[in-house]
Image (cartoon, rainbow, N blue to C red):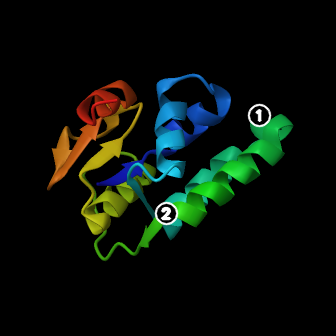
Amino acid sequence: MRVVLDTNIVVSASLTPEGSSATIVDLALAGSFKLCLSAEVLAEYREVLARPRFLRQAEKTAVLLEGLEDIAVIVKPANRLSACQDQDDNRILECADAARAEFLVTGNLKHFPSSFGITRILSPRDFLEAIGF
């Protein structure tokens, strides 16, 4: 199963280790599904987690990002999309499209269509339920 995680899932996982987002990141790191990333999505993860409000946990976020990069399937989107108002959200959707991901998990469902091609776009709780966790 191929999955793309919106940046807010990785941020939430780093801030709230007992939440649904952290569970999803832990499942990715454990190999329960294939995490798919593009260079642009990974760069966005890095940029957001390098912001001043995350400086106190810089070492933790560096380890998290390294772990995600180590286990990820890196894809190269061939198409630019404009299905979302926010260009950063379009980059996430492009990654899911290029990966032929079954799921895109986001905490901001209102920013995305409910599905795109074969990709279902779900909240963290709905994703965990969909995979039987």
**For the point 75% across and 52% down, which residue is it?**
62
Residue that appears at 42% across and 31% down: 107
Q: Position of residue 75 (x, y in %)?
A: 40, 72
x%, y% of residue 79? 28, 72
* Residue on which disc 1 sits: 53
User: Hey, which quadrant is residue 11 in on the image?
Assistant: top right
Q: What's the CA distance linking mark 2 and mark 1?
A: 26 Å
| Quadrant location, the C terminus | top left
**Amino acid beneath label 2:** Ala
Residue 110 appears in view: no
Element at label 2:
loop
**Front one among 27 and 5:** 27
Pick whichever, 79 or 17, lies toward us.
17
| 24 left or right of 1 in image | right
Q: Amino acid at mark 1?
A: Arg
Is disc 1 surrounded by few (<14), some (14 to 19) or many (20+) residues within 10 Å?
A: few
Q: Nearer the viewer, residue 87 or 46?
A: 46
Q: Which mark is residue 16?
A: none
Q: Residues within 10 Å of mark 2 (few under 14, many from 20)?
A: many
